[in-house]
Amino acid sequence: MIYGYARISRPTQNIERQIRNISEYAPTAKIIAEAYTGTTQERPEWCKLLKRLKPNDTIIFDSVSRMSRNAEEGIEEYEKLYNEGINLVFLKEHQIDTETYRSAISQQIEMTGNEIADEFIKAINNVLMILAKKQIYLSFEQAQKEVDDLHKRTSEGIKTAKLRGKQVGRPVGAEIVSKKSVSAKQIILQHSKDFGGTLNDTDVLKLIGNISRNTYYKYKKELKK
């Protein structure tokens, strides 16, 4: 099987570019997409994918940061999947595809039978493997650095804004206006007994659908104001 794994950190981000890039590279790839932080490997869809993988399956990523932005966990997952016979393809970092790593192993210099020469050859082969592994680690490390830099810039930006007396974030108690909240409030106003309707809270909640009880009572409180 060929899988394409696309991931965004928040639902408000756009995942289409990743899916398009993967589909262009492998039109038959089964796309697995989710919105979840990349700083942990315990992601729901990712974990489901790991359980269904079999030797010779392939996972395609738009970039290494989609697999992991934690260097230590990323390289550990890479080696684990490599040893299980899973092919990993990174569209923006083909130099660390598992095929490249596998090629580095297969191209190792063969032993000669001469003890002194073989010790030298063994040392060279070890260096080749260390360099290949280091390249993979550096790619994951760069992905982690980009996230750390983003957090630092965000923190510095917030601090600067506060020093200038600007409001950062939503004021405490501010109402969030969205299509969903407007629609829900219209239903509450029309049907809730508290606003002249005929339905109790349980029935109004069922009528609205897809909102939590806490959100429902928050909307009622806002309407009563």
Image (cartoon, rainbow, N blue to C red):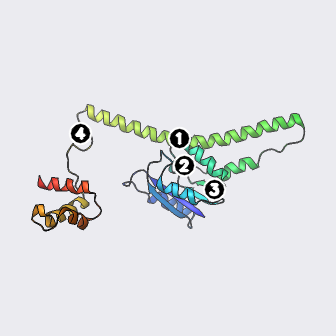
Q: Is residue 191 above or below residue 142?
A: below
In this orientation, does residue 160 appear? yes
**Quick one: label 3, few (<14), some, or many (20+) residues within 10 Å?**
many
Most extreme residue toward the top, as rendered? 163
SS type, badge 4: loop
Residue placed under numbered mark 1 in the picture: 142
Q: Secondary structure at mark 1?
A: helix
In this image, 157 relative to 17: left or right? left
Q: Is 131 situated left or right of 170 in this image?
A: right
Q: Which mark is residue 64?
A: 2
CA gap, disc 2 to disc 1? 9 Å
- The numbered mark, 4 or 1, whose residue comes first in the sequence reads 1
Residue at image x 17%, y 63%?
188
Residue named by callout 4: 167
Circle 2 Cα neighbour tier, 10 Å, few/some/many (<14 / 14–19 / ≥20): many
Give x and y (percent) for residue 14: 41, 56
Q: Nearer the viewer, mark 2 or mark 3?
A: 3
Q: Secondary structure at mark 2?
A: helix
Label total for image:
4
Report helix, strand or loop for mark 3.
strand
Instruction: Using the image as rendered, state which of residue 133 and residue 153 is in the foreground.
Output: 133
- Mark with earlier residue (3, 4): 3
Q: How far apart are the alpha carbons under marks 4 and 1?
A: 33 Å
Q: Using the image, determine if residue 9 lies above or below residue 120.
A: below
Q: Which mark is residue 87?
A: 3
**Amino acid at dot 1:** Gln
Location of residue 27 in the rendering, given as x and y in whole percent from the top left corner = 55, 66
Disc marking residue 57: none
Label 2 to label 3: alpha-carbon separation: 14 Å
Q: Earlier in the sequence, mark 1 or mark 3?
A: 3
CB under 8 Å between discs 2 and 1: yes
